[in-house]
Image: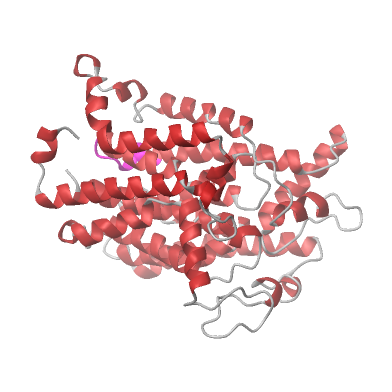
Amino acid sequence: MTVEAFSSLSGTSRRLLSALQFLALGLVALHLLSPLLSESTWWGVWPASNLPTWARWAGGLTVAFLALWGEPLWSALQPGGRHLLDRLRLGSARARILIALASALPFFLFRIQHLRWGDAYILSVAIPHPEVRLTYVWQAPLDVFLHARLWQEADRLFGLATPVPVYRVLSIAAGVAFVWLALSLAAWVGRDRAERWLVAGLVLTLGTMQLFFGYVENYTLMAAGMLLYAWLALRCLRNQLSIVWPATALAVTHALHPSTIMMLLPSLLALVWLRRSQEPLLRQLVKVGVPYVLVFIAVVALMSSGRHGLDALAGVDFPGGGDRSWFVPLRQITTKWQHYTMLSPGHLLDIVNQQLIAAPVVWPAFGLALLLAWQRIPSRDPEFLLLAVMAGVSLLLTLTWNPDYGGQRDWDLFSTAAIPAALLLSYTLARVLP
């Protein structure tokens, strides 16, 4: 910031902004030092070491410069007092659509190529395997079914030997939808230009965005569904639409991936409670229950049609990984699928790495806001409370769930928890800073 602008802020704002700058510089330094770090220990930042040295340092120093002196530079670039971003107004539906469509180009050009760890290898092999033909699985019922059926049709029409291109196309399409949703939500929730770009900027720079670079996994459609639900839930809280719509969006998202049941269903119940003065609780519960029952019946019917019904859910597809252990053990490791106990240094290190790869700024910045500007936190604001439940429960799942599914402790599954956290941080900073 300029000296004049900085000096005009209150002591609380100055301390918070200085702390955020320090946080940014620390993260830059950590990534610049990534070649000196062990991949197995610091897997959350180690990928930065794959960049050429010049590119890593140029990017790091650019971020550091913007963190310290970006505001004066930005002011100098305002021709005639007009803000450059006026040309890309998020309030314009056309601009949001064009930006979202344009995002397909980087998603396509920088496609993730790996197929050797996590579910990517299993999906790429099991779906076309003549003796397996993976189509029905309770771990991601609607997601796997959709990809498998589209591949079968593509194979019939074009002789497509592998479902990988289908996953890549749907990953990029989900990314385009995600970008549009993020921009539209930001345009709706932001009270001015700065707040709109704060929301969009935080959401669209999450490590979660890796899911949309042609990623072969079951989390891409689910991520877009989570963001859609968050937007509809906030609109419902303002009484702009019926609670049926966020409930329907979330129920379908559950069908894409059941992990969202634990992450977001508590927030739907919180939404019902926060709206109790607008609509009776019983009526709301009926409106929530109807789409849930319909989606559940549809999913059971779909899975049963493939002879993989509720008996499979209670049997071969029972959640919890190889040992059916849902959570990190508190005191003692009892199976080969458990990596550590809850309070062990190894678990703590993995949590740090998970945040570094998915949302390095979000929770540390929120913690700084709580520590340095707690008196300004809108703790009684219903929208803040709803986002806090979304983000808090999602974080709780990340902290406690047994990460025995994929490579690098299932970063991609847990990365979706960063979406509500980024919304919470943007909502908070917009109210604790001028």
The quadrant in which residue 85 appears is top left
78 in relation to 344, above or below: above
Q: Which residue reaches farthest top?
A: 80
Residue 377 position within the rendered picture, expressed as x and y whole percent measured from the top left: 21, 58
Name the one closer to the observer, 171 or 290: 171
The answer to whether 221 appears left or right of 84 in the picture is right
377 in relation to 149, above or below: below
The quadrant in which residue 109 appears is top right
Name the one closer to the observer, 272 or 396: 396
The answer to whether 315 appears left or right of 109 in the picture is right
3 in relation to 319, above or below: above
Name the one closer to the observer, 398 or 240: 398
Residue 87 within the segment the image draws in magenta: no
Residue 186 within the segment the image draws in magenta: yes
73 in relation to 248, above or below: above
Residue at position x 67%, y 74% in the image: 337
Identify the colour scheme used. secondary structure
Residue 239 appears in the rendering: no
Residue at position x 30%, y 65% in the image: 276
Quarter that holds the N terminus: top left
Residue at position x 25%, y 33% in the image: 69
Residue 320 appears in the rendering: yes
Residue 175 position within the rendered picture, expressed as x and y whole percent measured from the top left: 55, 39
Quarter that holds the C terminus: top left
The answer to whether 370 appears left or right of 213 in the picture is left
| Number of numbered labels in the structure image | 0
Report the magenta stretch's main SS. Answer: helix
Q: Which residues are magenta?
A: 185-192
Name the one closer to the observer, 51 or 241: 51
